[in-house]
Amino acid sequence: MTMELPKAYDAKAAEKNHYHRWETNGYFTPEINQDPAAENYSIVIPPPNVTGSLHMGHALQHTLMDVLARWKRMQGYRTLWLPGTDHASISVQRKVVEQLRKEENKTPLDIGRDEFVKRAWGWKEQYGNIITEQMRREGASVDWSRHRFTMDESLSIAVRNVFCTLYEQGWIYRGLRIVNWCPKDRTVLSDLEVKEETKKDGKLYYLKYPVASASTDSNDRVSVIVATTRPETMLGDTAVAVHPADARFKHLIGKTIALPLTGREIPIIADEYVDADFGTGAVKITPAHDPNDYLVGERHNLPKLLVMNDNGTMNAVAGPDFEGLDRFVAREKVIARFEELGLLDKVDDYEITLPVCERCNTIVEPILSEQWFVKMDEMRDMALDLMTKEGVPNFFPQIPNKKVYTSWLENLKDWTISRQLWWGHPIPAWYDGDGKVFVARSVEEAAENAGTSELRQDNDVLDTWFSSGLWAFSTLGWTGDKPAGHSTSPVDVTLDKAQDASDLDRFLPTDVLVTGRDIIFLWVSRMIMLTRKFTGEKAFNDVVITGTVLGKDGKPMSKSRNNGVDPIEMFDKFGVDATRIYLASIATGADIRWNDVGVETYRNFANKIWNATRFCLMNSEGSEIGRDSGGTTGNLPESILAQDTTSGTLADRWIVSRLNKTAMAVNRALGTYQFHEAVSLIYHFFWDDFCDWYIELKKDEINDGNSEAVSRMLTIIEQSLRILHPFMPYLTEDLWQKLPGTGAALHNPAYASAAPSIMLSDFPLGDAALIDERAETEMGSIISLIKRVRNIRAEMSIPTNVSFKVHVAAAVEFQEIFRANETQILKLARAESLIIGEVLDVPRASAKAVTNDAAIGIPLEGLIDFDVERDRLTSQVGKLNDEKTRLDGQLLNQSFVAKAPVDKVDALRARLIDLGEQIATLNRNIRSLG
RNA sequence: GCCGUCUUAGCUCAGUGGUAGAGCACUCGCUUCACACGCGAUAGGUCACAAGUUCAAGUCUUGUAGACGGCACCA
């Protein structure tokens, strides 16, 4: 069979041709695996927000997950990579509000909650699958039949059950706390959803608070100065605190302040919290608007006056002059009033860091509010136990992620889980007329418990991360519903039993989680705790933390910086496979500055693979790849092994050795998530060893149509394509289908009956028995010989079409090697004949060189420039001498000889002898030039 | 303030105590019948700086400088 392929690889064509077939043939489902004894392998995707579109961070993570899934699948694991999306309550809510305003000029209140939620579902249906659809282009081998959404019915049941169980056990509680409030989104935020922004032009206001004239002391005019960055909160002050030991204020403790603008009198109290050395030493206390003040208030039984509305305006408690004003307007007004009253001591410039909402950048207001919380102390201990006792999860890279994770856990505070939003999982709590709360799995259950159906459900929804915290097991069928006779892993009896019951058993714990470091706390930690709590299992064994893909400017990609790179554009420009393997070539966990040149490198690599295959196929009539004898290791077929150990040439044994070494190393690298190492190994094997040396050595045989040689080469290509497949699925499938002799017989036995695809072929593990160190050494001597001759030709500027004789002197064993490979050496060195002997016998007008194994002389009568030759040799001697000097020094060092391992010392001694000989030879050569 | 990461060739980055690597760019050649998205040959590094441990340090320790990240505080 002879085939003519286009001259360049067309990535787009290949991308169109395979995904649909893979998917419809069911290759992505674990059920494709027909081996009942197969081990399971599972990954759940970090569910992208339904509001998102694919960015480079997704592309990176998806690539790594797909590499793992395809690699394991080819090894015969029953493999599941489960896709899905997250309902992203606050993001979606914001989108829908915006849509309402734009299209109908309405607010959510205008249409009501039910209608709003309906719109949100509509929005999700319309836009929610953008990313997952883009994943098809990426080649992601996810099981679409198991696609999950965090608000799917079964996942919602799981959420309710988890909430109720935690409540019943006292791990969830409702309480009044100072929380982070976003006045724009009008909801509470968890600590993790609050970012910090440094304001350089902040101000610190010093306010004079007059001590009440009710004081019986004579010093009536006394006032206390307090400093604040939020003057408007003084309207809610209920005390001024000083340190109990502060002599300046001791006499005032117990007296009162006439709080300006309010007509209220507030006490001066003593509390250890105050740092006497900071500011004025006196602190205004606003228990409803500051976490520390809240604690002080608790200790001193102070009233807690909330002076703001949920939208950031002042409320009635702030007084008629301020009610309705925005907090920042109120701030200006408070300052103006203090100035009028002569009570503004001073205003300092003050650099301040403010808490802002991570999504809308609005300044977050700490306010007192009643919310739902998860108590984290026992959860934390569980997670810490897992880490210290079992080393779970195993982070890749371990540094710094393990420490970051552990120290975060150690300082963990309770988790605010309620959100004042409409889109999300409603909190399963109902209140009766007296405000008594009933937490239940349904309204009926709540009514039963309450003894009345006059109930009002809690208005709030749950933090999005609450449902994603269940993702590892809720997606595998766990709902927490009371099972029928299944004690260890309760499952949803409403789902397909045969399938989903086994999913949980089979795929939990999942094998690895691949995600970014920004959600280690938000998501990874919570999934670890909740999975342990509710299934007794680990969520996953390993966690691969990817780095950040930075823009060309070295900063994180963002819309505001406009430095983003669209993965789809890269796919169009360089191909999906090139983009994937480039992303995989980034060191695990390292940040990478995006550069197109890197992708271009692998686009070129794809083309190289295409053309190497094309070359073989052009000459492949009557040849096909060696048949596997039915082994399960994906190793070279025995037929090839036999050829190469008996009749094969040195080059054949060498390339087989290199291939097997590469395969073994690739598996080793992937086993520890060293994707970049695997990429580098296969890249250099294919390009350097196979294309630059092996193909070039065998070219004549191939062009002559030597079918045995072509078969052998096709076999190496086919094996290489399998190794490359997880990284470059489209190219490898495209070429594999074109190779003569490929078919289901090459599949891993677990997929024996499936229609042929490289993605089901047996992944090459490499066979130590096929590694031939002697062949590698011998081939090495030939390669250096050829390189030296090429160097002489280049340095002497000898035109390509001028041939010459090459004299080689070497030890007998190397003479034999060179003789046996004479044809190949002549071809690659572009020489006309090889004269091999014990000693070099060449005229003075010769260029000379040495390798570790041979001395070379090339007679160049009329072509040689003696000055150039002298410089060339001198520079070589210089290099060798540098090395010799270093080694001499080392070996003269008695402590080195005494303490370094014997084999190291011996190796240096041997090297030194070689060096001495080579230097002597080169020096003789220089002298002979005259 | 606390914890941590990074600093290697012109650029982007690998690097496992034992002779410093890759891709791209640069220089010099090549229309060699798979590939110019290619082939061949060069050049280019006090591994940020300083001390220490070690027979031996890019690699381990400490400090310094710069870049960055996380956490906490912020009257």
Image: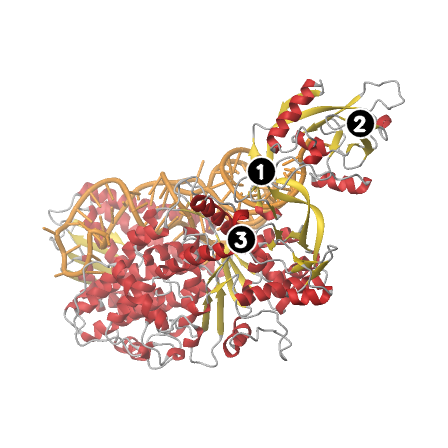
Q: Secondary structure at mark 2?
A: strand
Choose between A738 and A449: the one closer to the eye: A449
Amino acid under disc 1: Ile
Residue at left offset 69%, top offset 63% = A453
Residue at left offset 23%, top offset 55% = A856
In the displayed structure, A363 sits above or below A110; it is: above
Read off the chain for label 1: A
**Coordinates of residue A264 in the picture (x, y in percent):** 78, 30
In the displayed structure, A631 sits above or below A759; it is: below
Amino acid under disc 2: Ile
Residues at discs 1 and 2 in contact (Cβ within 8 Å): no
Identify residue for label 3.
Answer: A89
In the displayed structure, A731 sits above or below A750; it is: above
Choose between A270 and A820: the one closer to the eye: A270
Q: Is residue A48 left or right of residue A254?
A: left
Residue A256 visible: yes
Q: Give the distance between the C-alpha atoms of the residues marked 1 and 2, in whole angstroms.
A: 30 Å
Q: Give the distance between the C-alpha atoms of the residues marked 3 and 2, in whole angstroms.
A: 45 Å
Identify residue for label 2.
Answer: A257
Residue at left offset 33%, top offset 82% = A629
**Coordinates of residue B46 in the picture (x, y in percent):** 43, 40
Report the disc number at residue A158: none
Read off the chain for label 3: A
Which mark is nearer the camera, 1 or 3?
A: 3
Identify residue for label 1.
Answer: A363
Amino acid under disc 3: Ser
The disc, 1 or 3, on the residue closer to the chain's N-terminal end is: 3
